Image (cartoon, rainbow, N blue to C red):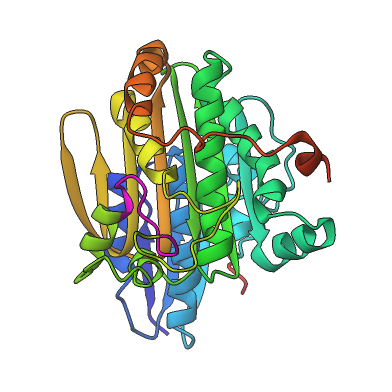
Amino acid sequence: MKEKTIDVPKNLYFEETIDFVNSFASIRKKRNYVFDFKKTLRIDPFSLLFVSQELKIFKNNNPLSTFHARNFLHLTYPGHMGFFKSFGLDFGKEPGEAKGSETYSPIQVLNVQDIKKSARDLLVNPGVVLDKYAESISNILTQNKSELITNVLRYSMREILRNIVEHSQSEKFSFCAQYLPSKGKVTFAVLDNGIGLKKSLSDNPKLTLKSDLDALLWGLKPGVSGKVYPGQKKKPKGEWANSGYGLYMTSNICKKGGSFFISSGNKGILLTDKKQREFELETHGTAVYLDIDLKSIYELDKMLKELGENIPKNVFLQPSKSTMDKNTKSIKD
């Protein structure tokens, strides 16, 4: 069997990662594929999730091929985060094995049915189960520099995770976060393997979705949901009704102090304060990537108050306390 070496880039940072995955994702030839990490030095949270998922899919799409990796022993931090074992390489820790800290959250893979079962056992909404993850993520993303931003991001993270559990039809999803003190930045990524945003929002008869790009643009608007819409006869009620503000709030926070990226289907959108860029990539599910500049955290306080004028007052209500209490190694399948 012929050997095909695929050189992994020096920096697996967002755009380099998209180009890298696009370069091999469509290959359908019977070969021995060797991923060489010799030049690789850094991998961001988005790349930890996206590359590991795409490597697994690449293997599944080429069942007659073999897969190996080499020159990866120097990448101890990605190994600690669970990157290698998440796609079948026996190096480093399993996803979720590392304890994490106030400055990072390693790759965690959550089973949707397990979350739903926990919620049923406690007689609560899945959002209650997910809130502890949202709290941990928001603390990392703000480094506790602003109580207002921390609370809003906790809400936003919980809504993003809850949307995955309730609407994506995904079996599982993964996320990780990292604080980079040398750059004064925090990053967070979450990735599911569900039906995608276009199909999820298609339940809303008020939306016309001709493409994945349409779905992304609509999904970023305030109050847009596949389950709640104007004129609905039986609209969900109560503190856990799907408000459709999670992506809207998160994207606006990131635009003012960094960047926000979301992809679903064959399209991705990157938002910053000055521009919007579109990307071609095949996302098997939906991916969200946040990059926040902590230097702008206090300016965000002011921005949030301005955004709040267009947000229903009950959006950020927390659940009641009583509710909350209740060298060359084989890559294996």
Horizontal side, residue 285 vs residue 239: left or right = left
For the question of whether residue 180 can be seen, the reply is no
Number of marks in picture: 0
Position above or below: 26 against 134: below
**Is 128 colored magenta in this rendering?**
no
Residue at 22% of width from left, 28% of height from top? 273
Residue 309 horizontal/vertical position (percent): 34, 27
Q: What stretch is highlighted in magenta?
A: 219-228
Horizontal side, residue 248 vs residue 109: left or right = left
Quadrant where the image shows the N terminus: bottom left
Quadrant where the image shows the C terminus: bottom right
Position above or below: 292 against 263: above
User: Closest to the observer: 1 or 291?
Assistant: 291
For the question of whether residue 213 can be seen, the reply is yes
Q: In which quarter of the image is residue 182?
A: top left
Residue 80 horizontal/vertical position (percent): 65, 42
Q: In which quarter of the image is residue 135?
A: top right
Horizontal side, residue 266 vs residue 333: left or right = left
Residue at 59% of width from left, 37% of height from top? 77
Residue at 35% of width from left, 68% of height from top? 204
Position above or below: 30 against 197: below
SS assignment for the magenta stretch, majority: loop
Residue 231 horizontal/vertical position (percent): 35, 63
User: Closest to the observer: 105 or 276?
Assistant: 276
Residue 301 horizontal/vertical position (percent): 41, 16
